[in-house]
Amino acid sequence: QQQRQQQQRQQPEKQSILEAAESEAFAAIWEDQSSFKAYYRRASCRQLLGRLEQGLEDCSQALHILAASSKANGSAAAEDEVRLLQRAIQQQLQEQQARRQQHRQQQQSSLGPGPAFPAAVPAAASGKGRPAGQQHGAAASSEPPAPKG
């Protein structure tokens, strides 16, 4: 129990440290938008903070910068690291989406089948709301219908 309490106290600390690191990476990007390392670091922070879609965007930007940069030393190793992070985030997103889908299905099954309501018939299909003598599909007219026969 003490260990759990300690973990609960550390959780806000960890989150604030990650948010500070994310802010520092943001500032680095602000100063140099061609820094793949800043995008990579921000993606890592966002992954740990659960901001997965934003983390994927940062990975894509880092890869774009690496591809455009011909002078990056060790760019193959850097690209591998970014792709590894990108795959990890994608996997987390897929797991998150699967859990959401499973949760929705459990909610629907616990509610049981919905009430059986008869299908609503639109007024146009039923003929209601039409002047006498006007047939289904006939255009409304100010003239009376032509006599039959």
Image: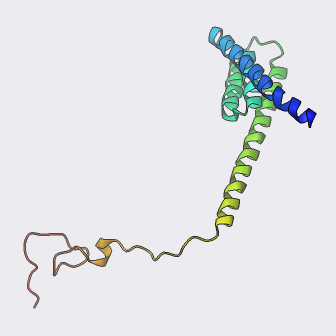
Between 57 and 78, the one lying in front of the other is 57
Query: Which residue occupies 74% across, 39% down?
Result: 90
Image-based side of 54 in relation to 41, left or right: left
Q: Position of residue 87 (x, y in %)?
A: 78, 36
Query: Which residue occupies 61% across, 71% down?
Result: 113
Query: Which residue occupies 68% across, 17% down?
Result: 23
Between 6 and 137, the one lying in front of the other is 6
Instruction: Give the image quarter of residue 144.
Output: bottom left
- 109 relative to 26, above or below: below
The quarter of the rendered structure image containing the C terminus is bottom left
- 94 relative to 6, above or below: below
Between 74 and 30, the one lying in front of the other is 30
Image-based side of 122 in relation to 143, left or right: right
Query: Which residue occupies 72% across, 56% down?
Result: 102
Instruction: Give the image quarter of residue 21.
Output: top right
Image-based side of 17 in relation to 33, left or right: right
Instruction: Give the image quarter of residue 136.
Output: bottom left
Q: Tell me if I can see residue 27 in this picture.
A: yes
- 132 relative to 2, above or below: below
The quarter of the rendered structure image containing the N terminus is top right
Image-based side of 17 in relation to 54, left or right: right
